[in-house]
Amino acid sequence: MGVELTALHWIYVSFICIIIALMIWRKDTSLACMIGIFLLAMTATGSLPLSISTIFKSFIYAITELLPTILVISIIVSMSKLLTITGMNEVMIAPFAKLIRTPTLAYWTIGILMMVISWFFWPSPAVALLGAVLLPVAVRVGLPALGVAMAMNLFGHGIALSGDFIIQGAPKLTADAAGIPVSEVISASIPLVFVMGIVTVTTAFFLLRRDMERGNIQQGEAVAIAENEVQSHLLTKRMKVTFAFLIPILFGLDVVAMYYFQLQGGDATALIGGTAIFILSLLSVVAYKKKSLEQITDLFIQGFQFGFKVFGPVIPIAAFFYLGDSGFQTIIGDFLPKQSHGIVNDLGVALSNIVPLSKEVGAVTLAGVGAITGLDGSGFSGISLVGSIAKLFAAAIGTGIATLTALGQIAAIWVGGGTLVPWALIPAAAICGVSPFELARRNVVPVIVGLTVTTVVAMFLI
């Protein structure tokens, strides 16, 4: 499993360090990312014109990869604006307002609902389903929009996705690479997933409460509408009640359709987005009547303005990190060593080759490799590598292949699937009207604490 590290690998690592440092210092990273892209292209091709054009091409690649998420978030925001303008949101949140009365209840209720729904349908559709309805309730009882985003993100993209017990996409990939049955990976991951989850979300909650008490967290916009924009007269009380029942029923039918037709990931998100478009159109026609044609277009414009405002700072950093995986060959060309599996995966293999083998070192290394492979922003892209390295380490140690595989899977998905890589946080951040970079910063300490404790637990389970 030897791998050749070239200047391209070291440039990539250097800029990862620079980008992380800028994030810690709360500085924008766009310029650093563009310089990194240019230097990678210049080192690979030796051509100044090609290197300059690579920056633009990498932006196109990033936008193409992110476009489905941009689109569904923009549409959900458009629908949410209309619900608020017509006063529909007041009617829809009334039942939840009776249950969620404190910030603590809001955090744990939203988080647990997110986790359960994400087990069945993955997190992105769950964010769209929950965010539009529960966000106003949580903000009203005093939980900042950032706290709502943390709850949805940590419970959904963290706990639910890292275990993936129901859909089993993640454990299937790691199990195949490790050469063991999926059931073994799932069984080994159960204690680790819940240790990681409980430690992380609890740490995040106490840090959130501390900063709320100190006044260090401001309320997010949360797709806010000024009071003078609300036009409750557009719908009668009976119409509001009718739509308050109809909208959850339509999204509920989406859930049934996802299960019946086995829709996952992008297909499930597309179904949610299409339903939101249908609701937006129907409600606009009923509320605005003859003026509905212009109003629908205006709502779409507002939604897309919000979507691209949120995604704007993310595109340069996404463009850089996509070069760490398959994006390098697509954007720059075939300039990596023949045995390379992408810059990020090469770095993971190199790390595994330079450490001594023992249970403790094996656990730390698998957690580290998983986290490194997650830095490309796709927790799933590196988990096959994690399975392969777990197989190698277990053969040397003589035990623990399932536990090592599960640990690497958890680390990769918590980082890249994800709770720390900014563009992996966009669905939750955008729905809640908060910065994905700020959300990533809030998650750093809880995730590191959780991953440290989980790695120590794994040492005893190997």
Image: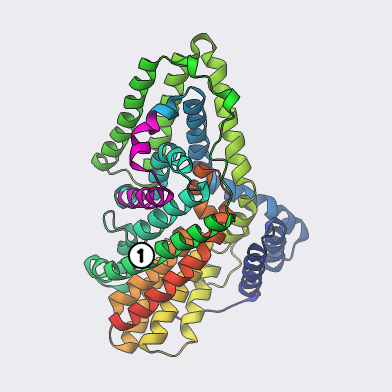
Magenta stretch bounds = 92-116
Task: State how the image is colored.
Answer: rainbow
Taking the magenta stretch, the answer to whether it contains residue 106 is: yes
Principal SS element in the magenta part?
A: helix
Q: Which residue is mark 1?
A: 198
Residue 75 can be seen, yes or no: yes
Residue drawn at the location 41% of the way across and 14% of the way down = 236
Question: Where does the image place residue 90, in percent across and percent down from the top left?
Answer: 43, 28
**At numbered mark 1, what does the secondary structure look like: helix, strand or loop?**
helix
Taking depth in this image into account, of 57 and 334 the one nearest to the observer is 57
Q: Is residue 136 left or right of residue 319?
A: left
Residue drawn at the location 52% of the way across and 29% of the way down = 81
Taking depth in this image into account, of 287 and 15 the one nearest to the observer is 287
Residue type highlighted by circle 1: Ile
Residue drawn at the location 50% of the way across and 53% of the way down = 425
Question: Where does the image place residue 327, in percent across and percent down from the top left?
Answer: 56, 58
Taking the magenta stretch, the answer to whether it contains residue 90 is: no
Question: Where does the image place residue 109, in percent across and percent down from the top left?
Answer: 35, 49
Q: Quadrant of the N terminus?
A: bottom left
Q: Is residue 220 left or right of residue 25?
A: left
Taking depth in this image into account, of 45 and 192 the one nearest to the observer is 192
